Image (cartoon, rainbow, N blue to C red):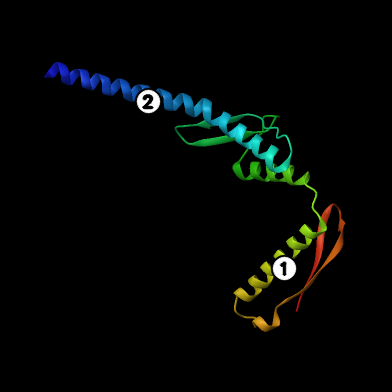
Amino acid sequence: MSLLRNRFIRIGLLTLVMLFIAYTALGFWLVPRMVRGNLQDLAREQYQRELQVGKITFNPFTLVLELRKQKGQELPYEAANVELTKALLASQPASEAELGDLARARAEAIRVALLGSGEIDAKRVFVLGIKAVPAVGGKVRAELALK
């Protein structure tokens, strides 16, 4: 019985060690490749752009994912997200209808925020209209009128 028990213990420990090695190897090697591939596929499919990402590292023990620019600068998640969003959105032309929809959505959000405090009567706040205004300094503007 002790021989059988020792054998099960050895097999169990060997299995745990093998699983640990597999987890470590896949975490350090596979996760960065999957992230890079998914980011590039997303940029290609959604934005018709090729995404250039520097080094991607993942530590499976701390669960930390790091994205680095081509020059070696480390980007925190928020900065990387902003950089990616800027790069992808800058290449997307927007139609007048889309800009109008965005302006209406923003105006409605402002109206809801004003009414959310409860200090202003709902009958006094409504969206009059959206008027396109030429871009200044590369920034798209819209004139919003709330009465």
Counting from the top left corner in percent of width and height, residue 35 is at 58, 34
**Foreground: 133 or 104?**
104
Q: Mark 1 points at which residue?
A: 107
Q: What residue is at 75 percent from the left and 63 percent from the top?
A: 103
Q: Is mark 2 on a helix, strand or loop?
A: helix
Quarter assignment of residue 142:
bottom right
Q: Mark 2 points at which residue?
A: 19
Badge count = 2
- Name the outermost residue toward the top: 3
Up the image or down, 102 lies above or below 128; here it is above
Picture quarter with the N terminus: top left
**Foreground: 120 or 46?**
46
Counting from the top left corner in percent of width and height, residue 6 is at 19, 18
Which of pointers 1 and 2 lies earlier in the amino acid sequence? 2
Up the image or down, 104 lies above or below 51; here it is below
Q: What element carries label 1?
A: helix
**Crowd class of label 1 (few under 14; some 14 to 19; many from 20; radius 10 Å):** many
Up the image or down, 131 lies above or below 88; here it is below
Quarter assignment of residue 43:
top right
Q: In this view, does 98 lie to the left or right of 117?
A: right
Q: What residue is at 69 percent from the left and 43 percent from the top?
A: 46
Quarter assignment of residue 123:
bottom right
> In the image, what residue type sits under mark 1?
Ala
> In the image, what residue type sits under mark 2?
Leu
Counting from the top left corner in percent of width and height, residue 140 is at 82, 57
